[in-house]
Amino acid sequence: MLRFESTLASRHLRSGGGQTLLTISAVATGVLVVIFISSLIFGVCKNVSDMLTDTLPQVTVTPPEPDPMPLAQTPGATAGLSLSRIERQTQQRKDIENWQKVDAVIRSVPEVVAVAPAVTGQGFVSRGSKSLGATLYGADPDRMNVVTPMTKYLVSGHYLGLRSDETMLSYKLAEDLSVGIGDRVRLTSSEGISDAFTVAGICDTGEDQLPQAFIVLRSAQSLYGTGTAVRSLLIKTDDLYHADRVADRLLAILPYKVDSWSRQHTNWVSSLSAWTSVAYLVSIFSLVATSFAIASVLIVSVLQKGKQIGILKSMGARSRQILIVFLLEGLGIALIGAAIGALLGCGALAILRNFKRAATHAGGTLQPVIPQDLTWQLVVVAMLAAVVATVLAASLPARRAAKLDPVQVIK
Amino acid sequence: MSRPIVNAQNLQKTYYGKIHVPVLHGIDLQVGEEEFVAIMGQSGSGKSTLLNILGCLDRPTGGRLEIAGQDVASLDDDGLAALRSDHLGFVFQYHYLLDEFTCLENALLPILIRQGSVSRRERDYVIGLLKRVNLGHRLYNTPDAMSGGENQRCAIVRALANRPRLILADEPTGNLDSRSGAEVFTLLREMNQETGVAVVMVTHDDRLARAADHILLIEDGHIRPLAREEQAARESTVTTLLQAG
């Protein structure tokens, strides 16, 4: 039943020539900017958060650090005034003895995808007379790899299938010690226990990586003397941003300290939030600018077609029909412009993907100059937003057209 | 007079602004079906205002107007649009055909506006009318590829497409040369006689008006029939002036 309206709207667009092209270009540019800029900003955000969460667990369960108690509160303390300055004790790490039960409780939380029991601590990695400080990670490689995908950053050798006398070193550490695959190194824990390991793998988690050595859980338990206990349970959730929620839930049911990656790296999180806000702001301003352009061009179009609107009304066209004609015109411009903008945006990003910077070392992978996160959801949302903004912009001139008094315009 | 399609009693129109401008002062007018009425008058006498009111494009500020038996005061904007669509056809001084449409599409527009689609029977009827006005070879031409007379003939067919009961023509020959003007007028008169549609035509052309069933003269917002003697005297004056010129 909209044949009159749709026919007239399509004829207007076809006969509009340069004016139609101008409005379609405005919408296409808006969508292009939204897709391009958002994709790049979200890409940077994703890159940063991936770097953080690929090498760190999203949620960590550790034993609580003991708080010192004021003398006056200790049982059997003598009454009377006492002045005391409360100072935290030096770190006294405790272990999770019954970690299998805790592991089962953690797995009962729906958003938890994987759990890796681990023994981590500070230590030294030595080769000959050269000794460097490092963080030692002891965990079952298969489970650890699900929580933090170490194999993704493997430069040489292997991590999965690591034996109890093998270790995987971070690239910088291996470079500083001048060791390669098959070389022997000595790991010494902060407990003073040491053992010899063969370098089975080298990984590179980024330029600013810390010196790290990865060994199997059993070896770490020996180095730190924890017996069968572990020092932490590392958790991966179904979504990066569910970490806080999972941490809160675990905190309520476990007598342990529970930290999420976002709470451990609040500066990074606020930076990511700021970048995301920038992406949204750029998108909004771009769409608003596009809307103004569309509204201006359509207002001119309504003024040009004043007499035509008057004659249509004299033939019995209702105001609602005229309104629909101009709204359909806006919709047509929006759909064509959004499709072109989406194609151009995706094309520009595809071209940009080809520009990569060289790896920092042999065996390293090429990285894009600017990371990007282009998803079909982003494309759909950008197109939908442009269509809504354009139709809203068209509604102003459309209402103006519908209200035109035929007597005034046919004079 | 046959059953009136237009029944206006004491129609008044005043434009309210910084200064109130009364244009029509109590117009009484009846136009019967199949009648051809010519309205004459000087510029600014209120002819076009009256025509706009009769065409339900404008509302009177006083009096009562019935079109096809409906009191227009009781109709809202959509009701007036429906009344125009069902019973009225307009022909203006300029054809106002839509440049984006062909001659046939322009002529079909009133049907498309009213129903959203055009049946084969209606299409055939309109094509028949276009052929009747010698536009059979122009069906698929756009207005810019047609002459002024052809466009105006197409506009007349467009006014007839919905089989209206009244055509309101505002100086339909005003933009045409005398030959094309005569053709267009003849066409209107023939359509009036063939289809029975009533016609109210505003014109400055005495010769064309003479061919109408009635001639009405608007002077200073008042309307009165032009007597035959008065008509003859006007023609004589015009002839004298032309000869003197």
Image: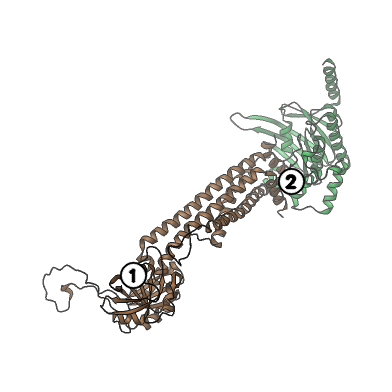
Chain colours: A brown, B green
**Callout 2, which amino acid?**
Leu
Callout 1: chain: A
* Foreground tag (2 vs 1): 1
**Callout 1, which amino acid?**
Leu
Depth check: A409 or B149 in front? Answer: B149
- Residue A108, can we see it? no
Q: Is residue A390 left or right of residue A42?
A: right
User: In the rendered view of the protein, which quadrant contains the N terminus of chain A?
Assistant: bottom right
User: In the rendered view of the protein, which quadrant contains the C terminus of chain A?
Assistant: top right
Q: Where is residue B106 in the image (x, y as percent from the top left)?
A: 77, 44
Q: Is residue B56 left or right of residue A361?
A: right
Which label was assigned to residue A177? 1
Residue B103 found in image quarter: top right
Residue A83 found in image quarter: bottom left
Q: Position of residue B79 (x, y in %)?
A: 70, 47
Q: In this view, does B209 lie to the left or right of A388?
A: right
Badge 2 density bin: few <14, some 14–19, many ≥20, Cα 10 Å: many
Depth check: A359 or A76 in front? Answer: A359
Which label was assigned to residue A154? none
Residue situated furthest top in the rendering: B244
Callout 2: chain: B
Mark 2 lies on a secondary structure that is: helix
Please tell me which residue is depicted at 73% across the width and 47% down the height of the picture.
B82
Q: Where is residue A31 in the image (x, y as percent from the top left)?
A: 56, 53
Which label was assigned to residue B83? 2
Q: Position of residue A169 (x, y in %)?
A: 37, 72
Q: In this view, does A243 lie above or below A4?
A: below
- Residue B215, can we see it? yes
Q: Is residue A356 left or right of residue A235?
A: right
Number of labels in the image equals 2
Depth check: A102 or A176 in front? Answer: A176
